[in-house]
Amino acid sequence: MPAKYHIRTRPAPPRRKPIGKYGIIDWREDCSACHNCVKRECAYSVYNDERDRLQGKVEYVDYLYECKGCLCCVQSCTKGLLSWDVNPEYQKMGDEVYTPDIISSTWYQSETGSVPVSGAGYPGPFRGPGFDSILTDMSEIVRPTRDGIHGREYISTSVDIGRKPMKLEFNPDGTLATCCPPIVEIPIPILFDARPWQKLGDAISRIILDAANELGTFAITDEPKLTSHAAAIPHISSRGEAFADKPDATTQHDCECFTPTGHARLTEWADANDVIERIQRAKSSDPDLIAIVKLPFGPNAAERAVELARAGVDVLHLFADWHGCVSPPPGKIPGGMHISLAIREVHQALVKAGIRDEVTMIASGGISLAEQVVKSLLCGADLVCIDIPLMVALECRLCMNCRKELRCPVDVNEIEPDYAVQRMVNLMGAWHSQMLEMMGAMGIREARRLRGEVGRAMFFDDLERDCFGPIFGERVPPGKMPGGIGGPGEEVV
Amino acid sequence: MASIVDPQRRRMAPVSEMGLEAPVREVKPAPDRFRNSLGKYMIYRNEECRQCETCVATCSRGVHVRPEGYVDFVRGLDWRCTAELCKANGTYCVDTCPHNALRIEESPIYRSVGDYRWTADLILSAWHMAETGTIPDGELNYRTGNSGGGFDRIEFVFPDSGPRTDPDEISTAIPLNRRGDNRPEVTIDIPVYGGGMSFGSVSPVTILSKARAAVAWNTFSCTGEGGYIERLFPYKDHIITQVATGLFGVREETIQMAPIVEFKYAQGAKPGLGGHLLGDKNTPAVAAMREAVAGTSLFSPFPFHSVYSIEDHKKHVDWIKHVNPRALVSAKVSTPNDVDMVAVGSYYAGAHIVHLDGSYGGTGAAPEIAKKNIAMPIEYAIPKVARFLTDEGIRDHVTLIVSGGLRTAYDMAKAIALGADGVVIGTAEMVALGCIRCGRCESGVGCARGIATTDPEMVAKMDIDWGTQRLINMHTAWRAQLVDILSKFGMRDVKELRGRTDLLRHLDYG
């Protein structure tokens, strides 16, 4: 058995003061400076710590990061001078997909490498769109299960990239007759995209590649200078050919390659009419090449995926937009389809075509939390590719200043590379631990077994139909009823 | 004075706990522990005020205060203010003030406190019930949260007319042993008991307050998996002791004195994972009880490493039944896809109570990913299991208790109408004790409000009499609401409500 996969996390405190959720509002003008000031009693020493930190600094004194919201000071102040509110700057961060809470949680994970743990029950809505309409199952008392990150039994998150033969054939003398195509095993089902949505320079792309290398995975890049990086998956545009600068095999990092020569090469090709011929040309000169074709999720994705898989493409990389939204086919689902549904559609088409086990499917777009990696796999992907969370790990606030060519509030381009790599490694460490928690709860100890295992998922629509249908009848689709599901505010008695 | 020998420490524990009076089922005011209670509104008084006291005369809730001998008004008791209601009634102080000296605005704290499940309204109304034993008569929604699904979208369809039952004739008692196996016929006076909260996750004051309120209401509280603290011995007839996967503090002697022993197979907030107690809360006293090393984080395994099949579960139940021939056995499980099979299996293995804990349940510490994603909400599990038990022909031989995100008396009644016999609550009791749902129970020494902590300084923020009274008041208000619901349906017994899904309507269904 190979050594346990372990991600080395190390504290990497933020360079800039993160935007906190809660703020104490302090009306000081009526303060009588009494000797039993509640600020001294803060259980978390927020006031004292902030005062010490800000001593000598010329900036606004605010308490927006550390306040935990226990409200003891607000409720105890002799003159009732303190109030409390959610920080409006916090609420403005991100958008409906990358919510302030997701950004804040990602910062925490990047800083500590730890699983976010808190008390009290889940505070969120009953259900949500997309991934939030899927629950994962757990194994109760009747099946052997595992212990998650604290357990004694190893849970593997390794997955394979490459084409797999459906069967092995042997010669009469017992030797293997099947020519096994090259395959790469990575220890986490996550690839990086080193081309963030905004051009940020080689430095950031190199940091992403270095982080991928440290984690034993790969990052997709189209920077000519970086394609020879040990963790690089070069992206070839719809007009490009395989690179002239074939990387030296010795630069490949220590991944689990199973190829005739021992060194597989991953390349990603943008989908195009002639992509199959170009890949075949490249493969004829380089038999160790593993070809990934990148194509968009959408109305024709399933059909095209089957076509490409049948034509011998090893890996399919299907992508949605960075919010996980798939453009709607004309006349169908207004507002687009969520990536979770799109993954299921393509997966099922490949299963129906009888070739699902031969190809690898990568999904990307809008994957912002560890749970979404697991859910993407349950929906049918073999692994996922992420981009924005890597930028959030570097303290990005998704303010979009870079898109407007304004100054980045956290000066992301000036970040120290080793520190930045550690932040990304920490984030993946936390994600990996969380994946183990979910897989342990499900009683699954192989990430490969997650693929398409919808039996270990619960979909809200199914639960509503099976549990509530016999009682309440037909559910009216959301939007057709005032204040439908998720519609807050309606008074219910 | 009767006494019980603590078998572990071989010394006597007095039955009358620390000189406290025996808890009584009687409402007494238990005002907020903090100087400034929280409310929906903030009142501002400007310099135009002439101290004419028109506002004092107008307000029926005593919001405006000018102590005797004072020239000016002091800060008003704005948490009592019900501005919208006053506007409707024509008793709005802002309008009646002859000098335009008053202004009332919604408090920013009210806007910010709470979440989808526990809205500010629910927290404030829970505090009101705990303080007064009555339901709030203002504008707070004390019945549902804002989660957009489950109980928050289900409502009772009350008949427009028809006879109402006299509230005094209504019984809210339920039996817990339906097996007819010659074990004690245990009955509780209200269809609700307190969930397991371990010594370590919450303070001894919290544990004792819960236990004493359970005595007053002739129901139960549960030790959780941290062991049976000595100070609980006087209340042993109302204490369920838990055997959880970590087996922390599990002792033959405490099992022998428990009327009910609960196996915690899983917990709704972290299904498929073991209990978590982070290092800072593991004080020397907690560690001694758990036979662990102080300061280390304690992660219980999952599942029981002696239970990998239903036969193993039966062996477990038999073990407890053998150790304590008078105990009832409860199996607390979470809500996987096959929760119905698990429930039936638990019954056949000999459990008297099947306790389902849904995925939105509370916890002292759990990975956020688990709280949000794993297992199904209790609203789905109740009808699924109730149907399966009925089909199996064993519905009347097992007590189905449910928990996991039940916040209000209405949630309790809806759970029973969906098919449960009774419910278990946890967070609702904590909120009654002053919890504000900041979710920091796991961090450092724990709760800054002195509820979920073991730090002596924090523990001292609450006292047992106050905590007991708050919970007695809360249960009084809850029972009154349940009785009101039963009365409107013309029922005389809460058992008649069980499984009456025909009395419910889901707002998202045609």
Image (spheres, rainbow, N blue to C red):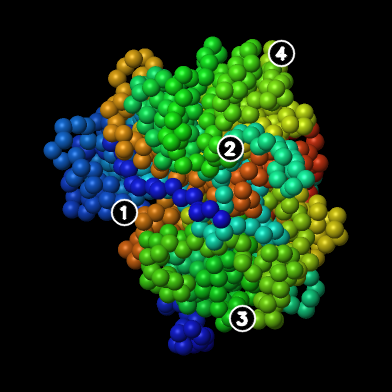
In the picture of the structure, the residue carrying the numbered disc 3 is: B256
Residue B288 lies in quadrant: bottom left
Mark 3 vs mark 4, CA separation in Å: 68 Å
In the picture of the structure, the residue carrying the numbered disc 4 is: A331
In the picture of the structure, the residue carrying the numbered disc 1 is: A43
Subunit bearing disc 4: A
Q: Does any portion of residue A425 appear in the rendered image? A: yes
> B361 or B105, which lies in front?
B361
Asked if labels 1 and 4 touch by Cβ distance under 8 angstroms, the answer is: no
Residue A11 is left or right of residue A362, and the answer is: left
What residue is rendered at 53% in x and 53% in y? Answer: A2
Mark 2 vs mark 4, CA separation in Å: 46 Å
Label 1 crowding class (10 Å Cα cut-off): few <14, some 14-19, many 20+?
many
What residue is rendered at 78% in x and 45% in y? Answer: A172
Q: Nearer the viewer, mark 2 or mark 4?
A: 2
Question: Which kind of residue does numbered mark 3 sit on?
Answer: Gln
Residue A191 is left or right of residue B381, and the answer is: left
Do the residues at discs 1 and 3 belong to one chain?
no
Picture coordinates of residue B174, whole percent (x, y) = 71, 64
Q: Nearer the viewer, mark 3 or mark 2?
A: 2
In the picture of the structure, the residue carrying the numbered disc 2 is: A259
Mark 1 vs mark 2, CA separation in Å: 59 Å
Q: Which residue lies furthest to the front in this view?
A: A173
Label 3 crowding class (10 Å Cα cut-off): few <14, some 14-19, many 20+?
some
Q: Which of marks 4 and 1 is nearer the N terminus?
A: 1
